[in-house]
């Protein structure tokens, strides 16, 4: 089955969309289209009380299918270390795998990674002189957005740093169960950010292959691959 038009799968923003005392979020999505949709997940950028970007959340339910007019409940939980700090979630709906693949040449070899964003990522390159990845991230919406880069582990001791428009910015670095580093940061409303991400392993070890994330040998702009961002609103306390 293929994913159908996600522009008509919406978060229901009413009293049923709730942030609970323990920091987790519950709510409903509805299919406003005339056809079923498949492989649905709800994602959110999670923010603290000061508007600081904390993490990216994902619904825990497996929503294999949603029929026209159907409402389905979802829930998501923040990382326990952030639970007490959560102020609001900024939710959106995507298909089964919302991450976008990139392949660039690093140290003379293909280097494959993925990213997830509420904006768009273009012009991704590896700069051999600084041993860093550069990218242009555009976010045209009036709310705060995010981008989360997922890099394969090389040495295991990578410590990243991020410049946006040549200035250091706050970001979150973490590692998932598949051994991928996550480098996530918030995006200002209606912004264009020229990012430089440093801290990559400088050995000649080849980039991992055979992983499900290593899809294509070309950069695919997020605007062409993610089905759509349906509603991008903040839910405050």
Image: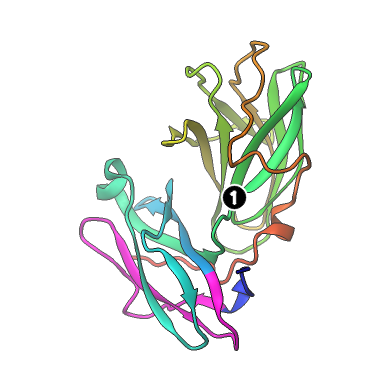
Seen from this angle, which residue lies furthest top?
203
Instruction: Say which of 39 and 196 sits in front.
Output: 39
Q: Residue 32's x, y, as percent?
A: 55, 85
Q: On the picture, is 86 further left or further right than 119?
A: left
Judging from the image, what secondary structure is the residue with disc 1 in? loop
Write down the region rendered in magenta.
9-38
Query: Residue at horizontal 67%, vertical 19%?
Result: 206
Answer with the quarter of the image where residue 217 lies: top right
Please tell me whether residue 99 belongs to the stretch shown in magenta: no
| Residue 196 spot, x, y in % from top left | 67, 30
Query: Which color scheme did the rendering employ for the protein?
Result: rainbow
Quadrant, the N terminus: bottom right
Residue denoted by label 1: 99
Measuring from the top left, give residue 216's x and y in whole percent.
73, 43
Q: Nearer the viewer, residue 135 or 97?
A: 97
- The residue at 74%/59% (across/down) is 224
Give the vertical position of 158 relative to 4 (above or below): above
Crowding at dot 1, Cα within 10 Å, few <14 / some 14-19 / many 20+, comes out as many
Compared to residue 98, the image places residue 3 above or below, namely: below
Q: Position of residue 88 (x, y in %)?
A: 37, 60
Q: Farthest left residue? A: 21
| Of 18 and 101, the residue lying toward us | 101
């Amino acid at each position: 089955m293929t994913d159908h038009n996600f522009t008509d799968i919406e978060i229901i923003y009413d009293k049923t969309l709730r942030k609970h005392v323990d920091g987790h979020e519950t709510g409903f999505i509805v299919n406003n289209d005339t056809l079923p949709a498949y492989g649905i997940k709800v994602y959110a950028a999670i923010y603290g009380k000061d508007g600081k970007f904390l993490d990216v959340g994902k619904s825990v339910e497996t929503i294999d299918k949603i029929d026209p007019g159907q409402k389905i409940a979802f829930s998501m939980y923040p990382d326990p270390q952030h639970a007490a700090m959560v102020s609001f979630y900024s939710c959106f709906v995507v298909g089964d795998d919302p991450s976008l693949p990139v392949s660039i040449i690093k140290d003379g070899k293909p280097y494959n990674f993925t990213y997830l964003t509420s904006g768009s990522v273009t012009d991704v390159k590896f700069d051999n002189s600084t041993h860093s990845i550069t990218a242009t991230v555009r976010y045209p919406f009036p709310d705060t957005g995010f981008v989360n880069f997922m890099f394969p582990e090389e040495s295991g001791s990578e410590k990243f740093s991020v410049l946006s428009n040549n200035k250091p910015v706050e970001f979150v670095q973490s590692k998932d169960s598949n051994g991928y580093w996550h480098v996530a940061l918030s995006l200002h409303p209606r912004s264009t950010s020229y990012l430089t991400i440093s801290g990559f392993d400088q050995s000649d070890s080849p980039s991992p292959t055979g992983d499900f994330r290593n899809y294509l040998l070309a950069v695919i702009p997020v605007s062409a691959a993610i089905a759509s961002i349906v509603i991008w609103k903040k839910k405050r306390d």
